[in-house]
Image (spheres, coloured by chain):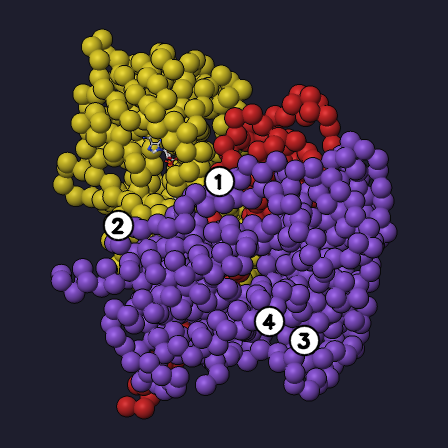
Chain colours: A red, B yellow, C purple
Amino acid sequence: MGKTIICHCEDISIEELFSAVEQGYKDIESIKRYTGIATGTCQGKCCLIQTLRALASGDDRSSPKTASESAASTPLKGIAVKMPTIRQPVIPARIDRIIKAGEKAVKKATGKA
Amino acid sequence: MNRTADMVIIGGGVNGVACAYYLARRGMKNIVLFEKGYLGYGATGRCGGGIRQQWGMDENIILARDSVRMFEKLSHELGFNIFFRQGGYLILISDERDYDLISKTIPRQNELGVPAELLEPKDIASLVPGLNLKTIIAGAYCPTDGTAYPYAVLWGYAEAAKRRGVDIRLHTEVLIISRKSGGTYEVTTTNGTVHTPRILNVAGAATRNTASMLGIVIPTKPYRHEIAVSEPLKSFLDPMVISIRKGFYFSQSLRGEIVGGIGDPDEPSSSSTASSPEFLFRYAEALRKTFPALGKVRIIRQWAGLYDVSPDARPIIGTVDGVDGYYHACGFSGHGFMLSPVVAKLLSELITTGKTSIPIDSLNLKRFSEPGLTRDPYVVG
Amino acid sequence: MPVEKNPAPDPHSEPSKAVFDFEGRSLEGIAGEPIAKSLFRAGIRILSYSVKYHRPRGIHCGRGRCGMCHMEVDGIPGIPTCNTPLENGMKIRRQDFRPFFAPVLTAAARRFPLPAGFYYRRFTKPVFLKNLFMDSLRKMAGVGRVTLDEEERLAGIIPDCLGTFDRIKPHYDVIVVGAGLSGMSAALSAASSVSGKRGDASGPQRNEAEQDNMRILLMDEYPNPGGHSIGHQDDSGLLNKRDDLAREVAEHPLIHVASGTLAQGFYPPSTILIAPTGGSIASAQGMKQVTARAFIFATGAYDIIPLFENNELPGIFGSRAARLFLERDGYSLGKTAAVYGTGAELERTVSLLLSKSIDITAVVEAGANPRETPARGSVPESVQRISNAHLVSANGKRWIDSATLITEAGRGERITLRCNMLCTAFRGQPAYELPHQAKFNFSLSDDVLDEERIMIPDEVERRDATGTACILAGEAAGETNWRRKIEQGKEAGEKAANAASAIKETGEKA
Ligand SMILES: Cc1cc2nc3c(=O)[nH]c(=O)nc-3n(C[C@H](O)[C@H](O)[C@H](O)COP(=O)(O)OP(=O)(O)OC[C@H]3O[C@@H](n4cnc5c(N)ncnc54)[C@H](O)[C@@H]3O)c2cc1C
Ligand code: FES
């Protein structure tokens, strides 16, 4: 225990986010793929905004520091806080339900004729 | 930025970063790589990561075979785990025509050192439990084929290249290339200008656009290909399963997701990378038919990328007559990821020595001005 | 005629018992109520474990979005148990199938955080170690399980769709996604603009022929219109308005109200993929593609749980989830709550909890400069308040038992509050999926307080080259005041109707 998890689907801690940035992964698309943040089952619905906030403020808010401490520790200067591409489907879709509902009407109609 | 370089590489896809690495390893200094987005913004970051040696033409078999040998050592060499996993490739055969072709090709693949074999349905059933074999008459299987994580390959090469001094400029687009007197090029980007004696054009589906800046005509066309990924599942599927006839493939990633796609033979050429609902319906249907148990699994994300397709679906690699210091590699027609280690290594040889350890003359741009093109029947899509 | 609904658990009908199997134990619950609620009552509160550190996870978002309550039900992996109705005879199990050596790795991982890129950077040599590592990773990875020996059970079947979903047409003038206050108001104003221009007949009855006349589709994933206006029990003005709007949209001849319909994605320029919600997990529901000339996204906002230690411990949830548990599902995850938040959302949540007889340990107001000055509303003075505090951790092993905060915005004293629920109540994050797919740009708001920063759309209206309009309204546009939401919906509806008729006219001329 005692961890601050920023992405619970992929179990990624806030330290991992910052260390990815330190390692040179500095845009949200690369950060996402390098750490796994926002690539889980929820596709970032629960973690993307915190990630962007953390990148913007450049500081791990869960352990309060003084302003100068956080300025010194921030590896995040110059990161563009941008929304990554949000793909379809919005909610995970079961493969056996990805089927055209309209086909029913068509089949019924031809069945009658 | 206003500077000179010994080499400018256009494109931060797998071919760009791999070439940067091999060139630097051969001692070339002062290499700059421009990528208009992030690493993997093009086809590499959108691809299925499949690596197979089961091909129809010698040229492809040899290049893919040598690539696999390189992929096997790559994690070690780069100090970066690229997640290369040799789960094999299983090609499903459902008609006599494919059966004839594949059973005739396997001996040649074996001669060239690729351990492919023909499987009967009952062998397929034990290799991949859960497949619907109703319409399957046989399978071709090569255990040393596999998959790698495309981003890890990109990052691994890029980090190793950076350690050897390569300057990788992300979010920098090449806008204009012009030839200057004295045999140099002026490359204008969104972020300054560079003068260089050499250019390597590996801009994926945009290679023909960057080539046209120098008056070079490349006859490739972009085609959108869509792909989707499921929620992560406990591992149950070892090989990549493909159907050449249907242009359909799926595999299970190391994270447990089912990654796969299906082509649409009727789709016209376009540079759109928008996803479509039609793809979801087609892909879901193909998956349900091929692997019924996957019906209960959920798709969490779909996306699309571009195949850069050449008239004979074979890559275009090498130099262009009359344009000194210019090199390119494009037209991979949907199988450029698997060839990248060897292609990049050969390009680095060509650029530094003028020769390659495997002949690649047959892949020169010139072939399109000569009569008669040969297409590899194993091309998907 | 009342609006037709997709079959959904009706809270007023007689509850019928359902016997189900949970990991080999036979338990009893109520058919039709969320599976997670029945499990909760039976004392099963840990619904999953996290993939890497094996941390316990419980019911959290209440909307099937977050994944913490996903379980295997009747052999189907990844069923969101928080909003899937219980059926008699269901077989339910957690999805954590770890090979025997995994606990060792997990224990190590729990102790030592894995650095970013760990997977890529460790064990690349020697080869045998790399292979061992890859094998272990492969065995540990993944959540759900696929049963391979099952027959092709749903392949190739004709989808059986639910209620109104079947009658959704392939094309509308205007599609409104989200039937909250702004969505309903948008649909009404679009309808009156459309009918004003075209002079369509109206009447309260609708038969099949009249269905053809419906030019506006108003859809919502929930079984009833009203969106997240549930849980505003002390604001009768809002509730009356909501009921009026719901009645008006239901009776309007031009509006097709499709409740229980989920927008699965926007595909530019003008297609939306929709799926029915609700119904049995075994039913083979299909999907539809619907097009329109104008779209209004009134899809509301999400809870964002701020960052603090153990912020995903079971018993922690957002204020929107609280409304769903308490109002829609009729149960509470605990008896004693700490509430952490700002502004109107905080006050509203506190009074909701109090109205359900939940003890409040303390109301913790975040930060010194919240965006909104709290209107204390109906919260009595006797409730303990701690202002300008910073929540630093939630504590507990398998369920939250206390929360620790530091006063003076993180510079003062450390206080630990005992509680078995922690509810965070901040301004929501506008649902960004569909707008982003429709090419809206977003920027991070510049609120002083980190917990209040959200991605807000740069504009509320976009038109593409074909003239198709996409308009945002309500909380999806960043609006939090309900009266303004209704106003905004109204404007969005007018704009959408205008855009739709402009395209129609160009189309007719061409
Ligand atoms: C859906 C899909 C699935 C695929 N599956 C497989 C598979 O399983 N196996 C396989 O082997 N292959 C597969 N491929 C093909 C494979 O992805 C490509 O052949 C390969 O990635 C090409 O790599 P590249 O480096 O040549 O090009 P790219 O990866 O496209 O890289 C080119 C880069 O150049 C950049 N660029 C373009 N113009 C400019 C400019 N003017 N200035 C600066 N930068 C520029 C682009 O942003 C891009 O990042 C698949 C492709 C797709 C689309
Ligand atoms: S919490 Fe990050 S993807 Fe779900």
**In terms of secondary structure, where does tag 3 sit?**
loop
Circle 1 or circle 3, nearest the eye: 1
Q: Determine the image quadrant of residue C108.
A: top right
The label number, if any, that marks residue C33 in the structure image: 3
Confirm whether circles 1 and 3 share one chain.
yes
At 27% across and 30% down in the image, what residue appears?
B210
**In terms of secondary structure, where does tag 1 sit?**
strand
Query: Is residue C347 or residue C226 the one in the foreground?
Result: C347
Using the image, determine if residue C225 lies above or below residue B147: below
Name the residue beneath numbered marker 2. Answer: C465
Task: Pick the quarter of the image with the N terminus of chain C.
Answer: bottom left
Task: Pick the quarter of the image with the C terminus of chain C.
Answer: bottom left
Q: Is residue C449 left or right of residue B309?
A: right
Q: Assess mark 2: CB under 8 A from ligand 1? A: no
Which mark sits nearer the N-terminus, 1 or 4? 4
Tell me, yes or no, if residue C6 can be seen here.
yes
Residue B268 lies, in percent from the top left, at 24, 53
Q: Is residue B95 left or right of residue B88?
A: left
- C-alpha span from label 1 to label 4: 49 Å
Circle 2 or circle 1, nearest the eye: 1
> How dense is the environment of label 4, judged by Cα within 10 Å: few (below 14), some, or many (20 and up)?
few
Confirm whether circles 2 and 1 share one chain.
yes
At 66% across and 21% down in the image, what residue appears?
A72
Name the residue beneath numbered marker 1. Answer: C443
Q: Determine the image quadrant of residue A61.
A: top right
Using the image, determine if residue C108 lies above or below residue B125: above
Which mark sits nearer the N-terminus, 2 or 1? 1
